């Protein structure tokens, strides 16, 4: 009982972070949504069905979980928003020593997205 409650709490926090990550480019969406789904699978069929059945998040999660990957358009939009926000942040932040530090999450998220399988891409 405690385990299911804990998994539901972790899943809900991960879901919230994943949704926030849609709008905040430095916060990754996919890992948090996958964590939420994994927690809900083990704790609440109802919550998992709500997540998978969501018209916006459901198809995205199903494609990743089934091994189809992330659509190329989603990767391109995510990378464009990421680097645009990093460039704006570098320009806006008055501390010059912070600017190089912005490259760390930028490179990390870019590497993560590029390593993920691209949906619809022909496998040779």
Image (cartoon, helix red, strand yellow):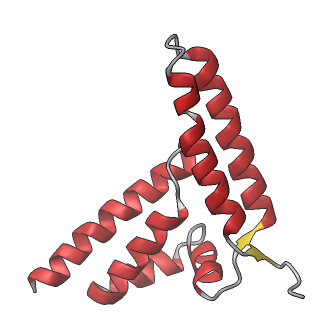
Q: Is residue 51 above or below residue 86?
A: below
Residue 49 occupies which quadrant of the picture?
A: bottom left
Question: Residue 88: percent from the left, percent from the top?
Answer: 64, 24
Q: Residue furthest left?
A: 2
Which sits in the foreground, 96 or 57? 96
Q: Which residue occupies 71% across, 83% down?
A: 68
Residue 56 occupies which quadrant of the picture?
A: bottom right
Q: Quadrant of the N terminus?
A: bottom left
Q: Is residue 53 above or below residue 84?
A: below
Q: Is residue 88 left or right of residue 96?
A: right
Viewer can see residue 104: yes
Residue 112 occupies which quadrant of the picture?
A: bottom right
Q: Is residue 124 left or right of residue 12?
A: right
Q: Which residue occupies 57% across, 24% down?
A: 99
Q: Quadrant of the C terminus?
A: bottom right
Question: Residue 73: percent from the left, percent from the top?
Answer: 80, 60
Question: Residue 32: percent from the left, percent from the top?
Answer: 44, 64
Q: Is residue 78 above or below residue 70?
A: above
Q: Which residue occupies 83% across, 79% down?
A: 120
Q: Is residue 44 left or right of residue 115?
A: left
Which sits in the foreground, 91 or 103? 103
């Amino acid at each position: 009982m405690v385990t299911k409650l804990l998994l539901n709490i972790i899943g809900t926090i991960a879901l919230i972070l994943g949704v926030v990550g849609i709008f905040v480019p430095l916060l990754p969406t996919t890992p948090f949504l996958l964590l939420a789904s994994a927690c809900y699978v083990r704790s609440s069929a109802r919550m998992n069905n709500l997540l998978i059945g969501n018209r916006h998040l459901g198809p995205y999660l199903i494609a990743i979980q089934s091994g189809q990957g992330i659509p190329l358009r989603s990767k391109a939009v995510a990378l464009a928003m990421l680097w645009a926000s990093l460039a704006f942040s570098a320009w806006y932040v008055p501390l010059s020593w912070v600017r190089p530090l912005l490259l760390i999450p930028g490179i990390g998220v870019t590497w993560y997205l590029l390593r993920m399988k691209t949906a619809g891409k022909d496998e040779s």
